[in-house]
Image (tube, grey):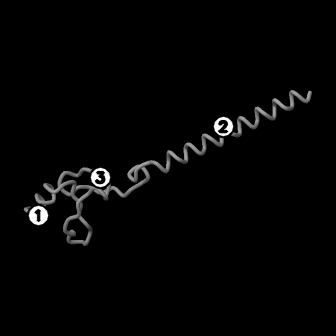
């Protein structure tokens, strides 16, 4: 009977260790995600309408209502200036 109890406790310890390892691994993967996957603010290009992370976008002059304008590249920022 004591052997059966020993193996039962051993199985529970192995199971709890495995669950702890899975949780630690998923936390490490979550921390390793890039900012876009963690919810970085997305902005829309004023010319082509493509959505991109704000850190990759180029800021432009503010609109008449004071809202910032964003562009996906220098060509679109220049194109908007000519219009």
Asked whether 9 or 80 is in front, the reply is 9
Q: CA distance from mark 1 to mark 3?
A: 20 Å
Where residue 2 sits, quadrant-wise, is: top right
Q: Is residue 21 left or right of residue 65?
A: right
- The residue at 19%/68% (across/down) is 61
- The residue at 84%/32% (across/down) is 6
Where residue 42 sits, quadrant-wise, is: bottom left
Q: CA distance from mark 1 to mark 2?
A: 59 Å
Of all residues, the one furthest to the left in this rendering is 82
Q: Position of residue 54 (x, y in %)?
A: 31, 58
Q: Position of residue 83 (x, y in %)?
A: 8, 62
Q: Secondary structure at mark 3?
A: strand
Instruction: Judge depth for marks 1 and 2 and give the one in front.
Output: 2
Q: Residues within 10 Å of mark 1 (few under 14, many from 20)?
A: few
Instruction: Decide which of tag 3 and tag 2 comes sooner along the chain.
Output: 2
Kindly identify which numbered label has been placed on residue 81.
Answer: 1
Where residue 58 sits, quadrant-wise, is: bottom left
- The residue at 81%/35% (across/down) is 9
Q: Position of residue 29 (x, y in %)?
A: 50, 45
Q: Position of residue 55 (x, y in %)?
A: 31, 58
Q: Residues within 10 Å of mark 3 (few under 14, many from 20)?
A: some
- Residue 20, placed above or below residue 43: above
Residue with the mark numbered 3: 52
Asked whether the beta carbons under mark 3 and mark 2 sit within 8 Å of each other, the answer is no
Residue with the mark numbered 2: 18
- The residue at 15%/55% (across/down) is 76
On the rendered image, what quadrant is the N terminus found in?
top right
């Amino acid at each position: 009977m004591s052997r059966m109890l020993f193996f039962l406790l051993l199985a529970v310890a192995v199971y709890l260790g495995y669950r702890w390892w899975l949780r630690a691994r998923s936390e490490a993967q979550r921390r390793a995600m890039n900012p876009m996957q963690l919810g970085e603010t997305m902005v829309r290009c004023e010319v082509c309408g493509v959505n991109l992370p704000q850190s990759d976008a180029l800021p432009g002059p503010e609109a008449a209502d004071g809202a910032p304008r964003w562009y996906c590249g220098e060509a679109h920022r220049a194109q908007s200036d000519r219009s």
